Image (cartoon, coloured by chain):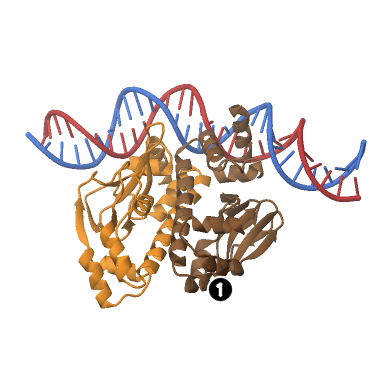
Chain colours: A orange, B brown, C red, D blue
DNA sequence: TTTGCTTTTTGCCATTTGGCAAATGATTCT
DNA sequence: AGAATCATTTGCCAAATGGCAAAAAGCAAA
């Protein structure tokens, strides 16, 4: 649990009593490879924090192709924000890429923290804002580059992921075919 | 100014006294075509709201190509969020695409609203969170599509923009060359 | 080790997109 | 109107990427 507290404390200060309040709310969730953390069509009712493993967010486009929107690895928040905040059904799947251990807060507990910890909302705002900005910053630059550059950028952005996820997921993240990615990797060495 | 108040009220409730407090802080900024609202290398100290005109956020990649990250048209917030929140120099230019009229809050005034209006922070959180999610949702799907589809998606996302901005800006937004975009447009009709 | 299953690589060719330069069109200024 | 400037379109060819299917490699269970 320490990882999560360290993570939170990056964004603000909490005393021990407040930390204990948070720890009391935490439950642990173990997902097997390919299990879903949340699913398209369902309202996402949890905020998670990846302790171990890699999760991806993906969806299907109108040609039925599966697209990976992004990856989330250890010590990062996993939450389908729009669905969680607006309590509307999501359009994406959040899926364990390998076996995962995830800390979880229910919506009820998350709200109670907001009501009981002064400054919690401010921390959450910073944390959410940063996470969302990061998504934009990671995704946007890809579009103006060719496939090889995109792959190299991916390696920089997610240095610990490439060897732990199937090639096809990376390809769909980069918007290229699996075959093209395979050829690109051959040419890089 | 009504536009801005309406915009804010989508995200929470305010009484007349609070609204007056906000209105008192507003100043108006007129930008000529091509003027910058904020610049790379400088700390962004303003939150804006576009009353009239179109603004774009752009940057230069390592090949010196100018890339349009996104467009902002009427009745939307314009803020270089990371720079504004963390008071660090920005890496992007925010530029008027045509003559613009923009409502502006200084950082100081923005903070004072946070200190004086109960619930202001909650409203701002919702508003920022939605704006950021929108950026992700608009950008991400483009990457897995071919250029023609990207252009069609652009038309849906920004229906009021295509005829008001140079072709080259749209092309750089879509990650294709101006010539390709020109050919694509020819083929669509 | 063998078998079966999944993932990755490769070959072949079609399609898409880029690069460059010239032509055309539009706009502004004089 | 004419000139200058800027934006857009087009032609030509090269390079990048996709589609499809088969081969190869990796992996796990028997």
Q: Nearer the viewer, residue A82 or A29?
A: A82
Q: Eyeballing the image, is A88 above or below B146?
A: below
SS for callout 1: helix
Q: Nearer the viewer, residue D26 or B116?
A: B116
Residue density around tag 1, few if under 14, some if 14–19, many if 20 or more, within 10 Å: few
Which residue is pictured at 28% across the width and 57% down the height?
A: A107
Residue B39 position by quadrant: bottom right
Q: Position of residue A81 (x, y in %)?
A: 37, 53
Which residue is pictured at 40% across the width and 59% down the height?
A: A131
Q: Is residue A127 left or right of residue B46?
A: left
Residue B166 position by quadrant: top right
Q: Position of residue C12 (x, y in %)?
A: 43, 23
Q: Eyeballing the image, is D25 above or below C2?
A: below
Which residue is pictured at 25% across the width and 68% down the height?
A: A22
Q: Position of residue A149 (x, y in %)?
A: 48, 47
Residue placed furthest toward the front: B16
Q: Eyeballing the image, is A164 above or below B110?
A: above
Residue B44 appears in the rendering: no
**Letter of the chain that mark 1 sits on in the rendering:** B
Q: Is residue B91 left or right of residue A156?
A: right
Q: Quadrant of the N terminus of chain A?
A: bottom left
Residue at which label 1 appears: B108
Which residue is pictured at 56% across the width and 70% down the height?
A: B21
């Amino acid at each position: 649990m320490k990882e999560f507290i360290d993570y939170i404390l990056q964004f603000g200060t909490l005393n021990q009593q407040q930390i204990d309040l948070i720890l009391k709310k935490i439950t642990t969730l173990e997902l097997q490879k390919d299990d879903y953390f949340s699913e398209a069509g369902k309202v996402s009712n949890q905020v998670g924090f990846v302790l171990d493993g890699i999760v991806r967010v993906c969806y299907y486009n109108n040609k039925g192709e599966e697209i990976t929107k992004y990856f989330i690895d250890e010590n990062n928040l996993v939450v389908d924000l729009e669905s969680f905040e607006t309590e509307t059904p999501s359009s994406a799947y959040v899926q364990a890429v390998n076996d995962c251990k995830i800390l979880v807060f229910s919506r009820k507990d998350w709200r109670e923290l907001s009501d009981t910890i002064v400054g919690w909302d401010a921390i959450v705002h910073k944390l959410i804002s940063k996470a969302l900005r990061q998504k934009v910053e990671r995704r946007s630059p890809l579009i103006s580059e060719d496939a090889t550059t995109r792959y190299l950028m991916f390696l920089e952005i997610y240095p610990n992921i490439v060897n732990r996820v199937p090639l096809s997921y990376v390809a769909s993240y980069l918007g290229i075919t699996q075959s093209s990615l395979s050829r690109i990797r051959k040419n890089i060495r």
